[in-house]
Image: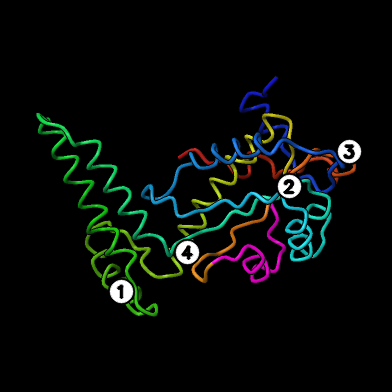
């Protein structure tokens, strides 16, 4: 029986040793469908998910992850990748979707206004934020926006480093969707940042603009795979009602 959201969150632990027991690739794939439904900045979906089931690729990726147990004993791996370089393609896809949704006669004034606003957002604002040249334009925009920000609220994340953070935040949200979905069906995961990301890119034959967000080990937990009881800072130390 599938767990509730709260049950899945409570069940999920970073599992570092897995049973030598196969898991259903189609179920893992469905969990990745759930990952793709995660919230994402400007709905640009600057992510890709590499579902690794090939034994040769698993062995190669395990080495790239320093042969840590979470990779070495995993039955499958998922590599979450950010693709900030695809922002033009993703913005165009959003515009095409808008044109399809609003491609009908007799649109209300509200719908016409919404279509124009959204189309301008993807056709003008997104290029303004994401367009850069060797990082120079990003800093020019950054300083201009800081000056404007003295007089009114304004978006300030315009440098390449800022946009990388935005893409990785969205990818992290997708990864969490995936791991909670896996927990809901009794599968276990471990998000790993410890890897040679250049080698991971080479193994997956990724282009230069792709970046590794995390590698996630997948399988069914061995009892020894949970390294001790869960520890969290007291909630009162991190919760602030304003």
Regarding mark 1 in the picture, which secondary structure is present there? Answer: helix
- Which callout, 3 or 2, points to the residue nearer the camera? 2
Looking at the picture, how far across and down is residue 160, in whole percent? 42, 70
Reading the image, the residue beneath label 1 is 143
Circle number at residue 76: 2
Q: Position of residue 90 (x, y in %)?
A: 37, 54
Magenta stretch contains residue 198: yes
Q: Quick one: label 4 or label 1, which is nearer the N terminus?
A: 1
Q: Write the start and end of the magenta stretch as one range.
A: 191-206
> Quick check: 205 above or below 139?
above
From the image, tell me which residue sits under label 3: 223
In the drawing, what numbered circle is on residue 104?
none
Disc nearer the start of the sequence (3/2): 2
In space, the residues marked 4 and 2 are separated at their CA atoms by 27 Å
**Mark 1–mark 2 distance (CA, rounded to whole Å):** 45 Å
Residue at the image point whose x is 14% and y is 40% from the top: 113
Picture layout, residue 150 above or below residue 176: below
Question: Which quadrant would the N terminus be assigned to in this image?
Answer: top right
CA–CA distance in space, label 4 to label 1 = 18 Å
The reply to whether callout 3 and callout 2 are in contact (CB within 8 Å) is no
* Residue 19 figure quarter: top right
The residue indicated by pointer 4 is 164
In the rendered structure, are the residues bearing label 1 and label 2 in contact, judged by CB atoms less than 8 Å apart?
A: no
């Amino acid at each position: 029986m599938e767990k509730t959201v709260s049950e899945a969150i409570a069940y999920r632990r970073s599992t570092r040793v897995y049973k030598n027991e196969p898991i259903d690739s189609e179920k893992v794939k469905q969990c990745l469908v759930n990952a793709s439904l995660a919230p994402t900045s400007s709905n640009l979906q600057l992510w890709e998910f590499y579902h690794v089931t090939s034994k040769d690729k698993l062995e190669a990726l395990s080495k790239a992850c320093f042969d840590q147990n979470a990779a070495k004993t995993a039955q499958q791996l998922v590599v979450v990748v950010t693709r900030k370089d695809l922002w033009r393609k993703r913005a165009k896809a959003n515009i095409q979707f808008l044109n399809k949704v609003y491609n009908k006669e007799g649109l209300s004034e509200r719908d016409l206004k919404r279509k124009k606003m959204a189309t301008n957002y993807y056709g003008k604002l997104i290029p303004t934020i994401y367009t850069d040249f060797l990082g120079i334009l990003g800093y020019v925009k950054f300083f201009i926006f800081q000056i404007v920000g003295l007089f009114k609220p304004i978006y300030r994340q315009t440098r390449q480093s800022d946009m990388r953070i935005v893409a990785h935040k969205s990818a992290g949200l997708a990864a969490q969707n995936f791991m909670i979905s896996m927990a809901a069906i009794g599968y276990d995961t471990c998000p790993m940042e410890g890897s040679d990301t250049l080698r991971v890119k080479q193994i997956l034959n990724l282009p230069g603009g792709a970046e590794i967000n995390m590698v996630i080990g997948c399988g069914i937990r061995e009892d020894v795979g949970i390294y001790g009881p869960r520890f969290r800072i007291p909630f009162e130390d991190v919760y602030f009602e304003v």
